[in-house]
Image (cartoon, rainbow, N blue to C red):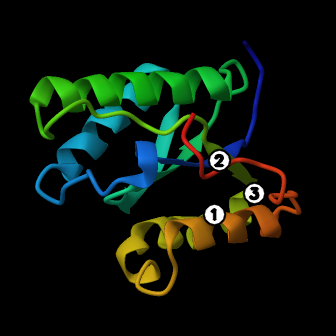
Amino acid sequence: MANTYSQIYIHIVFAVKGRQNLISKNWKDELYKYITGIVTNEGQKLIAINGMPDHVHILIGLKPDKSLSDLVRSIKANSSRFINDKKWINGKFEWQTGFGAFSYNHSQLTNVINYIQNQEEHHKKKTFKEEYVDFLKAFDIDYNNLYLFDDV
């Protein structure tokens, strides 16, 4: 795509199936490095990654030749396979169906990066569900009829 320029920044959020607290502090850094590799191998730029035991936040620079859904599908499929191959949990690890994706402009990146990096502090005040509903409200998304918190 010669002479194609873009600034597409997407904040992706997805949860462990059933919002179980399965992501251990003992191996989360290794998981995040693995996810960074997935994003890089898909030709995209990972800007920030962090999360909690039950969910992950990823900020990426998305190139216009890549489908966001395909990228997230690749991240979730490959990272769950990685966790299962490592046998880090008893039973089968799975991500919850679906994800949230929120776009930001360049001037907002510092705030989004700080938000992602400070997940532990932030979640002393809000649950994942409260956080996610606040995202939806901020983007004027009607969340009342969505089944965001039910596993399929």
Whichever of labels 3 and 2 marks the residue nearer the N terminus, that label is: 2
In front of the other: 20 or 51: 20
Q: Name the residue under label 1.
A: 132
Q: How far apart are marks 2 and 1 (CA)?
A: 8 Å
Q: Where is residue 107 in the image (x, y as percent from the top left)?
A: 72, 66
Amino acid type assigned to the residue bearing label 2 in the image: Gly
SS type, badge 1: helix
Q: How crowded is mark 3: few (under 14 residues within 10 Å), some or many (20 or more)?
A: few
Q: Distance between the residues labelled 1 and 3?
A: 20 Å
SS type, badge 3: loop
Q: Residues within 10 Å of mark 1 (few under 14, many from 20)?
A: some
Question: Tags 1 and 3 in contact by the CB under 8 Å rule?
Answer: no
Q: Number of labelled discs?
A: 3
Q: Position of residue 105 (x, y in %)?
A: 75, 57
Q: Position of residue 59 (x, y in %)?
A: 54, 50
**Mark number for residue 100?**
2
Amino acid type assigned to the residue bearing label 3 in the image: Asn
Question: Tags 2 and 1 in contact by the CB under 8 Å rule?
Answer: yes
SS type, badge 2: strand
Left or right: 77 in relation to 135: left
Q: Name the residue under label 3.
A: 105
